[in-house]
Image (cartoon, helix red, strand yellow):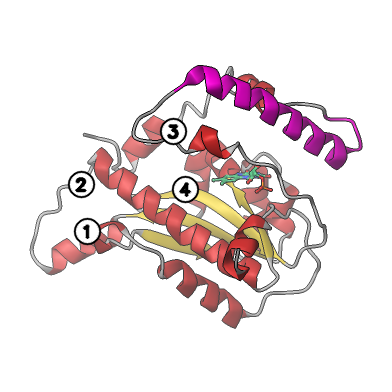
Amino acid sequence: MNQTIELLHAHRSIRKFTPRQIDPSVIETLISAGQAAATSSFIQACTVIQVSDTTKRESLAQMAGNQRYVAESPVFLVFCADMHRHQLACQMHDAEMRSGYTEQFLTASIDCGLFAQNLVVAAESLGLGGCYIGGLRNQIEAVSNLLELPELVYPVFGLCLGYPDQNPEVKPRLPINVVLKQDSYSSDQNDIVALEQYDEQVKEYYQNRTGGTKDQGWTEQISGMLQKEARPHMLEFLKKKGFLLK
Ligand SMILES: Cc1cc2nc3c(=O)[nH]c(=O)nc-3n(C[C@H](O)[C@H](O)[C@H](O)COP(=O)(O)O)c2cc1C
């Protein structure tokens, strides 16, 4: 253990914030920590939109399934996978950009994940807390229009940030032997045993967190979720934006 690893293990999503504002210089520090992440082939394909306009924040909160902290958190950021400026780079060199490759969609999306997680870790190291908002993809086209995103840019997720006004327990993660395999993918039967043990841990976590009202293991939660459609509008939207065409 060292301080960095301890910080990583102390992570929990924060959804309630004190009114204390975040200094703009801190935001710049966080953005630059995000930029310091590795980036596929140096593409630097993440653009962050800080949304401060209260009307837009209210709209985004509703689009995300009425998640109040989207409107109320001191800072709200939208992470966009962005291949638009690469078009500009090609124009600057009279080159015709070959876009629409699934590979480009993947690399730009991965860049956003790495950028954002660097930023979150930096924020947590400064005593801030946050919560990613994938709910923005519920109405991704409306979000994209609201933020005036051009072709080859899509909103991957949002992030609420602020000083925590709650102190939730750390959520237990899957056992190491389920997520770390050696040399090849192996042993569904062993995984089932490990998942059953993990279910008990997650049930206990939820019981403590909800005062006994929620009593659900991880496998039950996931099996419930995976019987539902998963934002089926996504492929059509991404194609419209110039992604996932080949
Ligand atoms: C990409 C992404 C999207 C998420 N979207 C939401 C969201 O829309 N609303 C929310 O309350 N939490 C959201 N979360 C937070 C997860 O629910 C949370 O990270 C997970 O339950 C683990 O809990 P922990 O972060 O407290 O460890 C999101 C997390 C990620 C990584």
Q: Which residue is mark 4?
A: 156
Q: Is mark 4 within 8 Å of ligand 1?
A: yes
Q: Secondary structure at mark 1?
A: helix
Q: Nearer the viewer, residue 42 or 6?
A: 6
Instruction: Specify the amino acid type for callout 2.
Output: Ser
Magenta region: which residues? 187-214
Q: Secondary structure at mark 2?
A: loop
Q: Is residue 148 above or below residue 227?
A: below
Q: Which residue is mark 1?
A: 87
Question: Could you tell which of marks 1 and 4 lies nearer the N-terminus?
Answer: 1
92 sits to left or right of 191? left
191 sits to left or right of 46? right
Q: Residue at x 47, y 26 (%)?
A: 232
Q: Nearer the viewer, mark 3 or mark 4?
A: 4
Q: Is residue 151 above or below residue 175?
A: below
> Can residue 148 be spotted in the picture?
no
Total number of numbered labels?
Answer: 4
The image's mark for residue 99 is 2
Question: Could you tell which of marks 2 and 1 lies nearer the N-terminus?
Answer: 1
